[in-house]
């Protein structure tokens, strides 16, 4: 693939691309509490961008500042080249889907969806046409005369989505869009959302605390903590090459070992564990001094587990006793206690049906762990 | 046939159940009995008197049921009192004036109370309790005392006039007391909490994100108010308005003390018929008509509401 073709799908890699939403120096304080702390963010046209973080990390406040419900203490928001700071919520070219859906309880589904169009002063026939189109799109055509409380949670969610999309906003803001749905419906709706976004080409900004949801949906994710971005990147980047312990442990689960750099070459780093002599060989260079304190993160699914010792000793090898086995159906997790008492988590897919109660390794069994040089990441913070 | 003696526990349970159900009927029955004794029976008596004839006797009205000389039971129902009410313009005008005063007072209470209730709902929890307390606080002093206090404020030599003269805005006292204006002040002041509290209870349930949703969809604040806030607070508006309108229509103390006989309301007419004219039958008829005037729209409203909730 050529460089040009690559940047069509990934505009953030293109230095010349103009961001669609441009946030600079954005800060929001509530009294002594700083909800959003001097953040910069570029979101490009057609992206499905997720703000991911725990509760109170500032993600919702940031979204509400884009919508115009909160005014920033400092900083600017540009949407499609226009400064938004002084523009009230009802004049911004964005629409929001609320976490509680905020459907008007006294209006029918059709009236709810039509609300924004009527405010724009559209003619009656045009409003009816677009409402019908939109309701058909979210497969609620037969429910247009119902009131919101006569619908299921999933149907209410689709009404909220239809109401926000019917105005053809430049940006759709979604606050925990799938939070109120049960797991199966959530997974199904995730894909519907993605298809819809692709079809309409509207830029989506999603706030979520659910890392799986963010991973599935997003073109890019911003991991937030205490009002700041920890890391911004594609789901793969965030998962495979987290740049801090916080991101590594927030996204999925991970094993973190503390150590110091014993060898630092352009193509690899050798890290020695602080607790014992075990060595970690990682196949990427690092911009740190030798002897610097670093952390090595290895995902549970990237560790091999074996009952037989490796043929020759070397780095990226550990051994311990199986302390706990969790059978999760499609995979099992093993908690292995190392000789230095540290617990390491390993997950292993259950590719074949285990015979009754038989596992890869048994409780209290001695096992050997190993992994590839490409599997681990060195973190400096 | 089962041996009941061998199952003492079942019998105990049965006894318990009987006691429980009889306890339940006591709990429900007691207020019913209370209402029967002190509301329905007095009402029946008033209704009876309204069909009687005024007499100079004790009691000052004729009886409906009488043993005739031929030993038959005679029932004498007279509609003269109601006819009298319909024919004398005084009564019709007083009814209309009462309804007018009550209606205008209700509208003022709504206009003042709605923003107050909204502000209380939107304030932070600590302030909210203080503000609610302030709304309820006047009830801790006697209603009569508060009306008298208004007399002191509104009188020719009262606080307000003295203050305005001291400021130099007016040279001589303006007439505040014993006017329609004073009656409105008194009613709106006294009944404002009855408007605010049901409105508050209704608005407290209002999801504030609905306002944001309306704004987000392009509604200016005034449009949001008209299309979202107002329809959703309508039950509170109706409840508060009824709580103000109904007692205000029959109000006696405020027009008497602050209106000083210049403002004729049905409560005053009733009082005069009863105490000054000693015409109990006409007074009863006045009360019955008032009840019908007030109950009819309320029943209509309830029918409407139950139909609406049935549609949901």
Image (cartoon, coloured by chain):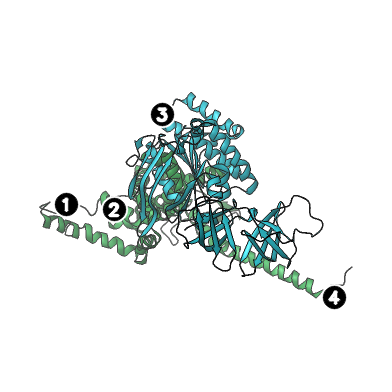
Chain colours: A cyan, B green
Labels 3, 2: one chain: no
Labels 2, 4: one chain: yes
Structural distance between the alpha carbons of marks 1 and 3: 51 Å
Structural distance between the alpha carbons of marks 2 and 4: 75 Å
- Check disc 3: other Cα within 10 Å, few if <14, some if 14-19, many if 20+: few
- Check disc 1: other Cα within 10 Å, few if <14, some if 14-19, many if 20+: some
Q: Disc 4: which chain?
A: B
Q: Residue furthest right?
A: B1
Q: Earlier in the sequence, mark 1 or mark 2?
A: 1
Toward which corner of the image does residue A88 lie, by quadrant? Answer: top left
Label tally: 4
| Residue under label 4 | B6
Give the residue at x 43% y 60%. Answer: B57
Disc nearest the viewer among 1 and 3: 3
Mark number for residue A121?
3
Q: Earlier in the sequence, mark 2 or mark 4?
A: 4
Q: Disc 1: which chain?
A: B
Mark number for residue B185?
2
| Residue under label 1 | B174
Q: Position of residue A375 (x, y in %)?
A: 60, 52
Closest to the observer: B305 or B186?
Answer: B305
Give the residue at x 45% y 37%. Answer: A44
Disc nearest the viewer among 4 and 1: 4
Q: Disc 2: which chain?
A: B
Quarter the N terminus of chain B occupies? bottom right
Closest to the observer: A345 or A369?
Answer: A369
Q: Position of residue A169 (x, y in %)?
A: 45, 34
Q: Is residue B89 left or right of residue A97?
A: left
Structural distance between the alpha carbons of marks 1 and 2: 15 Å
């Amino acid at each position: 693939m050529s460089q040009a073709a690559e940047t069509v799908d990934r505009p953030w890699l293109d230095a010349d691309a103009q961001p669609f939403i441009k946030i600079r120096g954005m800060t929001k304080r509530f009294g002594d509490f700083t909800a959003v702390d001097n953040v910069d963010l570029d979101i490009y046209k057609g992206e499905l961008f997720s703000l991911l973080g725990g509760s109170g990390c500032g993600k919702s406040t940031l979204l509400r500042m884009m919508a115009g419900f909160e005014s920033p203490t400092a900083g600017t928001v540009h949407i499609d080249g226009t400064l938004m700071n002084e523009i009230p919520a009802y004049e911004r070219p964005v629409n929001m889907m609320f976490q509680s859906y905020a459907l008007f309880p006294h209006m029918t589904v059709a009236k709810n969806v039509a609300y924004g169009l009527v405010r724009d002063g559209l003619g009656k026939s045009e409003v009816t046409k677009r409402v019908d189109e939109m309701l058909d799109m979210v497969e609620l055509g037969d429910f247009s005369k119902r009131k919101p409380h006569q619908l299921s949670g999933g149907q209410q969610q689709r009404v909220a989505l239809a109401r926000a999309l019917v105005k053809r906003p430049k940006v759709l803001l979604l606050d925990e869009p799938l939070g109120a749905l049960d797991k199966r419906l959530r997974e199904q709706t995730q894909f519907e959302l993605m298809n819809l976004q692709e079809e309409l080409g509207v830029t989506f900004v999603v706030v979520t605390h659910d890392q799986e949801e963010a991973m599935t949906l997003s073109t890019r994710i911003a991991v937030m903590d205490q009002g700041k971005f920890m890391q911004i990147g594609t789901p793969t980047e965030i998962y495979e090459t987290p740049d801090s312990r916080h991101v590594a442990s927030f996204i999925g689960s991970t094993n973190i070992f503390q150590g110091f750099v014993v060898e630092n070459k352009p193509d690899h780093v050798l890290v020695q564990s602080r607790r014992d002599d075990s060595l970690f060989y990682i196949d990427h260079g690092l911009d740190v001094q030798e002897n610097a304190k670093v952390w090595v993160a290895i995902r549970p699914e990237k560790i091999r587990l074996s009952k037989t010792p490796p043929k020759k000793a070397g780095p990226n090898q550990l051994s311990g006793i199986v302390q706990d086995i969790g059978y999760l159906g499609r995979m099992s997790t093993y908690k292995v206690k190392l000789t230095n008492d540290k617990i390491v988590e390993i997950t292993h897919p259950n590719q074949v049906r285990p015979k009754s109660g038989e596992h890869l390794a048994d409780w209290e069994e001695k096992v050997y762990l190993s992994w590839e040089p490409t599997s681990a990441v060195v973190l400096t913070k | 046939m089962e041996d009941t003696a061998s199952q003492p526990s079942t019998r105990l349970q049965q006894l318990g159940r009987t006691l429980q159900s009889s306890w339940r009927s006591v709990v429900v029955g007691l207020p019913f009995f209370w209402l029967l004794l002190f509301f329905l029976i007095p009402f029946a008596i008033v209704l009876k008197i309204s069909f009687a004839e005024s007499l100079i006797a004790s009691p000052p009205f004729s009886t409906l049921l009488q043993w005739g000389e031929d030993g038959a039971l005679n029932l004498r129902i007279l509609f003269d009192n109601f006819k009298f009410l319909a024919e004398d313009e005084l009564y019709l005008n007083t009814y209309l004036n009462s309804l007018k005063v009550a209606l205008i007072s209700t509208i003022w209470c709504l206009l003042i109370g709605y923003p107050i209730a909204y502000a209380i709902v939107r304030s932070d929890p600590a302030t909210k309790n203080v503000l609610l307390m302030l709304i309820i606080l006047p009830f801790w002093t006697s209603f009569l005392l508060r009306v008298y206090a208004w007399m002191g404020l509104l009188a020719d030599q009262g606080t307000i006039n003295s203050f305005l003269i001291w400021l130099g805005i007016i040279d001589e006292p303006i007439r505040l007391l014993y006017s329609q204006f004073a009656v409105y002040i008194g009613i709106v002041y006294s009944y404002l909490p009855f408007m605010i509290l049901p409105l508050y209870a209704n608005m407290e349930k209002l999801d504030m994100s609905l306002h944001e949703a309306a704004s987000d969809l392009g509604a200016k604040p005034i449009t949001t108010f008209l299309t979202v806030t107002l329809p959703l607070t309508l039950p509170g508006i109706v409840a508060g308005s009824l709580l103000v309108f109904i007692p205000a229509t029959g109000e006696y103390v405020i027009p008497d003390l602050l209106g000083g006989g210049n403002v004729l309301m049905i409560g005053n007419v009733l009082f005069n018929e009863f105490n000054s004219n000693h015409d109990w039958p006409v007074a009863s008829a006045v009360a019955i008509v008032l009840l019908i005037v007030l109950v009819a729209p309320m029943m209509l409203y309830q029918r409407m509401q139950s139909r609406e909730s049935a549609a949901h």
